[in-house]
Image: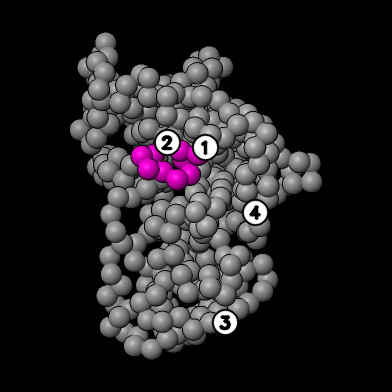
Amino acid sequence: MAAPAPTRRRTTFHPLAVAAVERLCDDAVAVTFAVPDALADEFAFRAGQHLTLRREVDGREERRSYSICAPVGSAPRIGVRRVDGGLFSRHLVDEVRPGDVLDVLPPRGEFTPVPTDRADGEHHAFVVAGSGITPALSIAATVLGAGARATLLYGNRRTDTVMFGEDLADLKDRHRTRLHLVHVLSREARDVDLFTGRLDADKLRALLAAVVQADSVDHWWLCGPHGLVVDARAVLAERGVPPERVHHELFYVDEPPPSPRRAEEVLGTASSVTVVLDGRSTTLAVPPGTPVLDAAQRVRSDLPFACRGGVCGTCRALVTDGEVEMRRNYALEPHDVAAGFVLTCQSVPLTSSITVDYDS
């Protein structure tokens, strides 16, 4: 089942020393942080959560979120793949060394399983590609440690681009009878044709027919490019998998958000918006068509955010009064939206008065 609503969110960045930097492949590393005892509770994480990092580049604050790859109870460790032109990923992959200090926000995120009394009877399946392995590794190691079974379908271009290859091999050695690990390579031939090619809808249909029966899985975890997640959800729906058993997380979406057409039609004047964070309320005027986060940040610099693209979910808040329109949403589950949660980076006012609560 999906994770319960979080407790009050921790919005203060802390300087953490880098304890280790491990090379995973030519363009990726794992970075482990040293957490002082005084911050141990702040940085205790659930499997699949992420850390938001910040740094100043040319006088501008940049933030990025990176998923934790470690099992619950370990030191926080993130996986980072270099992105072409990436201001943050290039720094982490090529320049950061043990002993360096980075500003880190405590863990957050709802792409995480809930401990249950029947963990040793559950079957978790993962469909991931590229750096999408990062949260999946944390979740898989954690549920396997609790006695569950896991099937991991992992797509990459070639063997030398596989992140966490050694970690996965070690995990397989520790849980031989309960972990089924399948590597699918798109640009390198495998001995079995089934494991060669892109991890797209057709390949997933073939894998589900030969490797894992959809109805034998309690929870599906999807992470990777937008196209992979869309294809996987469609194939699982074809197999009759209930949507509440399918959880997904994206790292990026290569398309601009749609224009807030309804907001422009409904509201012609500024809205009075109240934001609640860490028990403190602030009210401000938000012009029509302006995302709540963009306007509120000018008076509340402590508001949480990272990607600003509707992907990471860092700016999640509950609308307790009024109505907003979300331009797009790739982070919240349907039950979150039904409960009134929104991504404030994508939410524009539809009513003259609105309250959003980041503490909920």
Residue at the disc numbered 3? 283
Residue type, numbered disc 4:
Phe
Residue 278 horizontal side relative to residue 356, left or right:
right
- Provide the residue span drawn in magenta: 83-92
Would you say residue 279 sits in the magenta stretch?
Answer: no
Q: Position of residue 176 (x, y in %)?
A: 50, 15
At x 54%, y 17%, the residue is 170
Q: Upstream in the sequence, badge 4 or badge 1?
A: 4
Q: Which mark is residue 13?
A: 4
Relative to residue 39, is residue 215 depicted above or below? above
Location of mark 2 (residue)? 82
Q: Position of residue 240 (x, y in %)?
A: 29, 43
Q: CA distance from mark 1 to mark 3?
A: 37 Å
Disc with the residue nearer the chain's start (3 vs 2): 2
- Reply above or below: 22 against 306: above
Q: Amino acid at mark 1?
A: Leu
Say whether disc 2 or disc 1 marks the residue closer to the N-terminus: 2
User: Which residue is drawn at the image coordinates 62% and 48% (left, top)?
Assistant: 104
Confirm or deny contact between disc 3 and disc 2 (CB under 8 A): no
Question: Helix or strand or loop: what does disc 4 sit on?
Answer: loop
Mark 3 residue type: Thr
How far apart in space, not on screen, are marks 3 and 2 (Cα)? 40 Å
- According to the picture, the residue beneath numbered tag 1 turns out to be 92
